[in-house]
Amino acid sequence: MLDRKLTANKVGLGPERPIRLIDTEHLGRVEYHSHDFCELVYVKEGYTVHYYGGYATVLTEGDLFAVSPGVMHAYTGLHYTKVYNCVFLPEFLGDSIKPLSALAGVSGLFGTTDDVGWIRMHLDTRDRMKVISIMDKIAAEENEALPGHIEMQRGLLVQLLVLLSRIYISQQGEETTEHSHMNYVIKALSYIEENYRENIDLSTMAERVGISPDYLSRQFKKAVGVSPVVFLRGCRFARAMELIRTEPEKSMEEISSEIGYKYLSHFSREFRVFTGMTPSEFKKTVI
């Protein structure tokens, strides 16, 4: 696989500008690439399939993930996605990098390429507002360029990383009444990602989570931006694309069956709607 390395200077990073907040719109495929800098990505709108460190996941509105230096990643699919990219040089954190590296959920950002850390966190409305607020302040400091703005940005970045660690820890704990609706969504996300190969539908998901199908559908779409059924389809095609890329010897019949499709024609038709190309055409772009 070709490693297209994106260097710091290509995104405007350097000694005089060690951190940037970039507002980006993806309208199609973003090829595999790696960086020599750190990146935090917050999905503001839309959804897409993301390849990262050998994993394929569906990213939706409210997702946040980190990309370590040297780790390959890519986006695919034809769906409109708007993201905030917070890119920075690791050395920008100075002496703070050591204690930050010890924080749960953040350590992988500064680790080796074998230590990819967490792949994705899905934020509830309150946490989204906190994250966007800090990112907007980082951007404002750069735009205004007042005396001491670099130091302000460094402090805001530390604040953001500590916040992400706390969110990560809270999502590993027990559910609370205040966030119970979000916990239902998180449980549904986990169930779909673990069982997408099976013959599951909205009723099955709701039964496993413990709420009614209508309530799950409303809360899921409110939190994630797409319906549970659309997310399920995205998980299946993310896995299909991963199999096509990593196990090219498998037939399309085998792949379609492995991800839960009974008929190859149905799989091929929906794959084309999702990616804009047939499975065979997609295979030619990645092999």
Image (cartoon, rainbow, N blue to C red):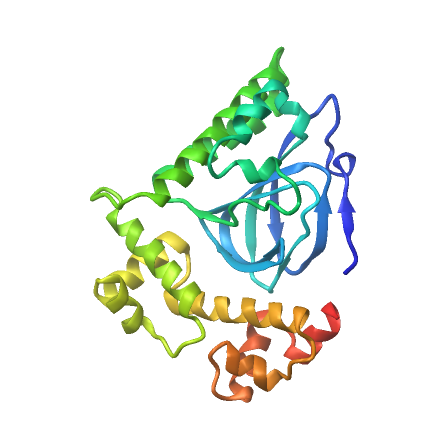
- The part of the image, by quadrant, that contains residue 277 is bottom right
Residue at the location (53% across, 59% down)?
A: 57
Q: Is residue 185 left or right of residue 38?
A: left
**Quick check: can you spot residue 79?**
yes
Q: Position of residue 106 (x, y in %)?
A: 52, 36
**Quick check: can you spot residue 85?**
no
Q: Image height check: is 144 above or below 198?
A: above
Residue at the location (68% across, 40% down)?
A: 69
Q: Position of residue 103 (x, y in %)?
A: 48, 32
Q: Residue furthest top?
A: 147
- The part of the image, by quadrant, that contains residue 142 is top right
Residue at the location (59% across, 77% down)?
A: 272
Q: Is residue 50 left or right of residue 7?
A: left
- The part of the image, by quadrant, that contains residue 208 is bottom left
State the residue in front, 225 or 248.
248
Split into 4 quadrants, where in the image is the C terminus?
Answer: bottom right
Split into 4 quadrants, where in the image is the N terminus?
Answer: bottom right
Q: Position of residue 240 (x, y in %)?
A: 57, 72
Q: Position of residue 151 (x, y in %)?
A: 60, 16
Q: Is residue 165 left or right of residue 84?
A: left
Q: Image height check: is 215 above or below 113?
A: below
